[in-house]
Image: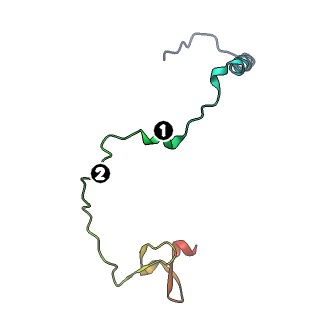
């Protein structure tokens, strides 16, 4: 959109008058009502291109937990022993969950 820098600028008073007039016009306009649309119904008919992953195979190599790692009893993530914050009744908690 082109801007005319030579045109006179509106003062704050002019802007407030314009906005009041616009608000009054919007209030009288019946077509600006609230739209009742269920988001889940709208999303069901929308499909992203290339979203079908049924023919894809997982190509990540999964390693078992190593001897110097533990599984946090709170977040169930595998962490290195250096991130072990506490151990109670065989329950190991990482430093992130202990904070």
Describe residue 8's horizontal placement relative to residue 54 as left or right: right
Q: Secondary structure at mark 2?
A: loop
Describe residue 68's horizontal placement relative to residue 74 as left or right: left
Q: Earlier in the sequence, mark 1 or mark 2?
A: 1
Please tell me which residue lies in front, 38 or 2: 38
Q: Looking at the image, which residue is at 46% across and 74% down?
A: 76
Please tell me which residue lies in front, 88 or 25: 25
Q: Secondary structure at mark 1?
A: helix
Q: Looking at the image, which residue is at 29% across and 71% down?
A: 62
Residue 73 locus on image (x, y percent)? 49, 78
Please tell me which residue lies in front, 9 or 47: 47
Disc 1 crowd rating (10 Å Cα; few below 14, some 14-19, many 20+) is few
Q: Looking at the image, which residue is at 30% across and 47% down?
A: 52
Q: How many marks?
A: 2
Residue 45 locus on image (x, y percent)? 42, 39
Residue 24 locus on image (x, y percent)? 73, 19
Q: Quadrant of the C terminus?
A: bottom right
* Residue 68 position (above or below residue 37): below
Describe residue 8's horizontal placement relative to residue 41 as left or right: right
Of the two numbered discs 1 and 2 in the rendering, the one whose residue sits closer to the viewer:
1
Q: Looking at the image, which residue is at 41% across and 39% down?
A: 46
Disc 1 and disc 2: Cα gap in Å? 22 Å
- What is the residue that sits farthest to the top in this orientation? 7
Residue 42 marker: 1
Residue 70 locus on image (x, y percent)? 42, 80
The residue that label 2 is drawn on is 53
């Amino acid at each position: 959109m082109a801007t005319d820098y030579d045109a006179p600028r509106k003062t704050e008073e002019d802007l407030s008058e314009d906005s009041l007039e616009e608000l009054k016009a919007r209030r009288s306009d019946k077509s600006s009502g609230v739209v009742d649309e269920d988001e889940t119904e709208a999303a069901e008919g929308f499909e992203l291109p290339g979203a079908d992953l049924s023919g894809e195979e997982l190509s990540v190599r999964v390693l078992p937990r190593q001897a110097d790692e533990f599984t946090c009893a709170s977040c169930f993530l595998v962490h290195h022993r250096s991130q072990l914050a506490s151990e109670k009744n065989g329950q190991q908690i990482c430093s992130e969950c202990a904070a």
